[in-house]
Amino acid sequence: MEPVRTCIGCRSRASRSSLLRVVAQNSHVIADDSAVLPGRGAWLHPSLECYRLAVRRRAFGRALRIRGEVDTSNVENRLNGVITNE
């Protein structure tokens, strides 16, 4: 049986393989495609709709326990298909 996680955007439960793991590095939220980066992670459906819901609800900061401003541009770029060299 595959592990089940909750999307921080829409709050629905889904299998781990259908969600994107995100982690915080400093105040930047980055996509963890291989789900192996260290630190506290949160799970998100790989859709702009769930991303926008999570931003509107301020779910990234709460789920990743980040205080202050949270930069989620890396995740947004990943969902838009933009390739970055990070």
Image (cartoon, rainbow, N blue to C red):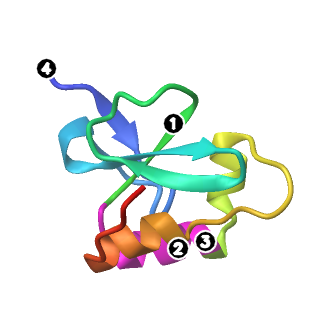
In the figure, is residue 46 to the left or right of 11? left
Q: Which residue is mark 4?
A: 1
Q: Are marks 3 and 2 in contact (CB under 8 Å)?
A: yes
First of labels 1, 4 by sequence position: 4
Q: Position of residue 22 (x, y in %)?
A: 46, 47
Please name the amino acid that badge 1 sits on. Gly
Numbered circle sitting on residue 53: 2
Mark 4–mark 2 distance (CA, rounded to whole Å): 29 Å
Secondary structure, mark 2, is helix
Q: Position of residue 7 (x, y in %)?
A: 42, 52
Mark 3–mark 2 distance (CA, rounded to whole Å): 5 Å
Secondary structure, mark 3, is helix
Mark 1–mark 3 distance (CA, rounded to whole Å): 16 Å
Badge 2 density bin: few <14, some 14–19, many ≥20, Cα 10 Å: some
In the figure, is residue 65 to the left or right of 68? left
Mark 4–mark 3 distance (CA, rounded to whole Å): 31 Å
Residues drawn in magenta: 46-55
